[in-house]
Image (spheres, grey):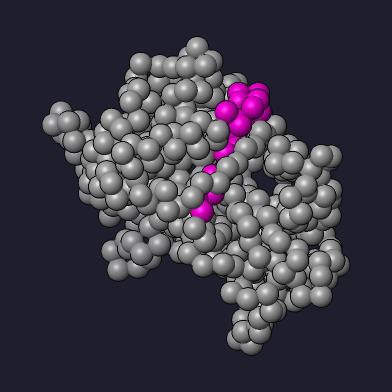
Amino acid sequence: MERLSGLDATFLYIESRSQLMHVSGIIQIDPETVQGGYRFEDLRAELARRVTAMPAFRRKLYNPLINLDHPVWVEDDKFDIEAHVHRVAVPAPGGQRELADLCAHIAGIPLDRSKPLWEMWIIEGLANGCVGVMLRMHHAGVDGVTGAGLIAQLCSMTPDPPELDPKMLKETAGDAPPLELAASGVKNVVTRPLSLVGLLPRTVKVPVDWLARSKRGDAMPAPFSAPRTSFNGSITGHRSIAFAQVDLEDVKTIKNHFGAKVNDVVLAAMSGSLRRFLADRGELPEQPLVGMVPVSVHEAEIGATLVEGTNKVSGMFTRLVTDIDDPVQRIEEITNRMATSKEHFGNINANLMRSWAQFAPPLTMQTVMKLYGSAQLADRHPVIHNLVISNVPGPSFPLYFLGGEIKAMYPLGPVFHGAGLNVTVFSSEGHLNLGVIACKEQVPDPWPIVEAFVEDIEELLKAASA
């Protein structure tokens, strides 16, 4: 038995039919590298074998009425691989847009909470000869780091099936006797106010310091200070997806020339892309867009103990450079803006958000979020931030997913009421893979965003090579 942290559970509480809280990845593998040739049945059988040594794929939620605290993970004693792995074919002609449309439809389907919260779709019929794989996992069970770790366990450095760790074969999530679960829940609820004593002083310091920094001009943008765009309102459950791949060496050339970070290059290029996208729609605001950048806090501590749970992430706000037309000026300015945001964020307790999430009341949060969505309140209050944009580093060497060499891996995060656009990049084997997912009603066609991103990288590369 493993209890969800407050932040893990929050992703369950805020989920609705329109605000789905799973993260996804679209992988394209070369079937020619699979030993004995590709067959769906063989791939599913190999996945079933790997999952026997991966407890995270076999656990499901357990939350009886007598539980006063957050739900727990328990072993699914009726686990059936066929309930999680599905086989489909992409419509003709099997191009990247057809693949994106199919995956967008899948992304709009809620995960079944009576089973382990993941599923895999094997997609055949791609024109480029690859086999597509769409893996979906609920955010309650993974964040960027742990999600990449789970995918890594399904990968190997050669096409050969790896040996399984015998120690992992014996690990399970454990049973959860109702009385034991109730007792631990009562204990947590009763002792939780004690942690509030230490939490309040650290929290009070944040807005005071933020205000002082704002006056000095060295603060990251505050929540509710973003300009409104057409993708900053209430969302539906329909999704649109687009993706692209650029050469990582080109990105590094730009980074080295301008003395920036890889993430700065990504933010500069995405700012140029969004600037062009919004200008073409006649809605480019004078004020720069505000991006929320997820930051891993897996190593951060609260006092002497770590906050338990899977999701160990916080959020940093930064002003993008959508207010600047010249691409060179954009990358120079985003480097300065990110440096300010990082310095400010570094002075805030990294686990503050996760600490407050421990107090999340399930019924209250579910009721509030239902009212928030149905009343379309995101259309009325000031915009918290315009979009989520994150960067997940990956391996620099070839990987094989269930025996097939990975040719591309596009990450896709969730979208929220008020921020119906999510951009995620993942670096792997000399490529930077860009995944964009949006509320379909707000961004019916996200392909111009990824195409403009690629063009902006090319412009920056020309400037760096001049």
Left-right relation of 49 to 270: right
Instruction: Give residue 33's position: percent from left, percent from top.
Output: 72, 69
For the point 44% across and 17% down, which residue is it? Answer: 284
Instruction: Give residue 448's position: percent from left, percent from top.
Output: 57, 28
For the N terminus, the image quarter is bottom right
Residue 146 visible in the picture = no
For the point 30% across and 32% down, which residue is it? Answer: 328
Q: Give the range drawn in magenta.
A: 431-448
Instruction: Give residue 334's position: percent from left, percent from top.
Output: 30, 36
Residue 107 visible in the picture = yes
Q: How many labels does the image show?
A: 0
Magenta stretch encompasses residue 421: no
Left-right relation of 356 to 17: left
Left-right relation of 16 to 329: right
For the C terminus, the image quarter is top left
Instruction: Give residue 108's position: percent from left, percent from top.
Output: 71, 39
Q: Which of 410 and 236 is in front in this view?
A: 410
For the point 48% across and 64% down, which residue is it? Answer: 396
Is 270 placed above or below 164 here?
above
Is 4 placed above or below 244 here?
below
